[in-house]
Amino acid sequence: MVGENPEEEAKNERIEEKVEDQVKAQMQQGAGVEQSESWEETARRIEAKIKSEVAGWVGVRRDADWREVGQGVESKTKAALAGWAGATPQDDWDTVGRKIEARIREQAASWTGIEDKSQAEWDEIGRRVERRVRDDLGRWVGAEPDASWGAIANRFQTRVSASINEWLASRRNAPAQPKESTMGEAQAPGGGPQQEEFRVSGGELLDKFKQLVHEGNVRRIVIKQQDRVIAEFPLTVGIVGALLAPMLAAVGAIAAIVTESTIVVERAPKA
């Protein structure tokens, strides 16, 4: 087996040394270590700096050892959780854990309408949560009371499909789209508006729309799927805030139902 070229090996070694020197210099700078120090001293300084910062955060001496720092972290964490759950910092972890579990259970029971929250069992809470979610979805899609999950899913699919078809049908009589440019960018005769077009996926549509709006010189954006106009947005100079929000919402809805589209852009004529 033929080995590497000696010159290539030497070149690789120099690259490795340079990378190592750069990494070491950055670490030493962060740790406040002279560049002449060894890796061992650099590591020791970095550890001391991290320990000091953690110690200051948990309220122990900055020169404390790791055991004291660890105890401080545990104490501060337990105090925060205990305060939320209604325990005290003096309680042990078992007590804090039980009170956290009890508070979560009471909040879940309250949301589901169980009156005796302190005695609610998780099995009953789970059944109530599932029932409430199913009922809320069922009402939203117009399903019968106590409908099964399968019936709700069918109604949901029917409702979404109907909404999409109705929306697309409403766009069939949309104004004619601007004339397409076959070269990506063109200027109309006599210094008229410039036109561009971009093909984008559904996931890219909203971001591309925002980018074009923020460019400032776009006067009209048309979104097409194949040869059919889906939406058209005339823009004015400085459009922001409440005026822009409905457009973004509409483009976001379009992006959710198309896999690919073409954006036709009309720009203000160049001065």
Image (cartoon, rainbow, N blue to C red):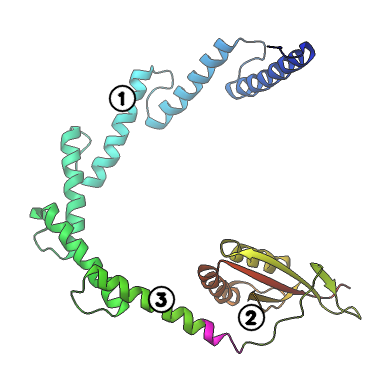
Q: Secondary structure at mark 3?
A: helix
Q: Which residue is painted at 44% across and 22% down in the image?
A: 51
Residue that mark 1 sits on: 71
Q: Amino acid at mark 1?
A: Gln
Closest to the observer: 116 or 225? 225
Q: CA distance from mark 1 to mark 3?
A: 55 Å
Residue at the location (40% across, 22% down)? 61
Q: Earlier in the sequence, mark 2 or mark 3?
A: 3
From this view, report whether residue 177 is shown above or below residue 32.
Answer: below
Q: Can residue 181 be found in the magenta stretch?
A: no
- Say the numbered circle drawn on residue 229: 2
Q: Which mark is residue 160?
A: 3
Residue 19, quarter of the rendered image: top right
Q: Is residue 28 above or below residue 79?
A: above
Q: Position of residue 112 (x, y in %)?
A: 18, 64
Q: Residue lying farthest front?
A: 1
Find residue 125 and report its image quarter: bottom left
Residue 107 visible in the shown view: yes
User: What amino acid does circle 3 point to?
Assistant: Val
Residue 42: image location, x then y, percent: 57, 15
Seen in the image, is 182 located left or right of residue 48? Answer: right
Do residues under tags 2 and 1 come within 8 Å of each other at their CB atoms?
no
Q: Amino acid at mark 2?
A: Val
Q: Which residues are magenta?
A: 168-173
Q: Nearer the viewer, mark 1 or mark 3?
A: 3
Of circles 2 and 1, the one toward us is 2
